Image (cartoon, grey):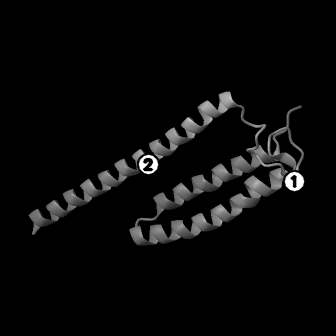
Amino acid sequence: MSVCGPKQNGAAIALLVYLAYFVLRGSVENEEQRARLSAVYNIFAFAAMIPLIFIIPRMQDSMHPGSGGNPGFNMYDLDSKMRMVFYPACIGWILLGGWIATVRIRIRMAEEKINESDDEKNQ
């Protein structure tokens, strides 16, 4: 019989918490109120992640690295072959996230310019 461990349960709860964050952001029309509510929710959500992801799983026995208080990234967890893939993959994901953020910023700026030109035409 296979039972989900505390790491899987914590990750599932974290996923639900942050999905609720996106629902909150999408449900508020006023931009300033949406930003304020989302920021406050995100602070509490992040505070909830500390026990869910870091503390509770380390208190339970597990076959995963990092259980029992051991650090997850020690010299025995990644051999040199895995490091050659892991670190470039991390850099790639960071660059992809940065690119997506810049695209979203450029889209928002273009929408604002379009709205400004529409406002000028209407006046």
Q: Separation of disc 2 and disc 1 at Cα?
A: 35 Å
Instruction: Locate the C terminus by quadrant.
Output: bottom left
Q: Is residue 76 left or right of residue 42?
A: right
In-front residue for pair 15/84: 84
Q: Earlier in the sequence, mark 2 or mark 1?
A: 1
Marks 2 and 1 in Cβ contact (< 8 Å): no
Instruction: Classify residue 115 by image quadrant.
Output: bottom left
Query: Left of 31 or right of it: where is 93?
Result: right
Where 4 sits versus 16, above or below? Answer: above
Q: How packed is label 2: few (under 14 Cα within 10 Å), some, or many (20 or more)?
A: few
Q: Nearer the viewer, mark 2 or mark 1?
A: 2
On the image, the x and y values in percent for residue 97 come to 47, 46
* Between 77 and 121, the one nearer to me in the picture: 77
Q: Quadrant of residue 54?
A: bottom right
> How many marks are shown on the rendered structure?
2
Q: Which residue corresponds to the image point at 73% horizontal and 44% vertical from the top-left?
A: 73
Residue 59: image tag: 1
* Residue displayed at 67% across by 52% down: 14
Residue 20: numbered disc? none
Residue 33: image location, x then y, percent: 45, 72
Question: Residue 52: horizontal and vertical position, in percent?
Answer: 75, 56
Identified by mark 2, the residue type is Gly
Name the kind of residue labelled 1 in the image.
Met
Left/right placement of residue 71 relative to residue 15 reads: right
Frontmost residue, 35 versus 80: 80
- Residue hosting label 2: 98
Residue furthest out toward the top: 81
Quick one: SS at disc 2? helix
Q: Secondary structure at mark 1?
A: helix
Give me the residue at 46% from left, 43% from top.
95
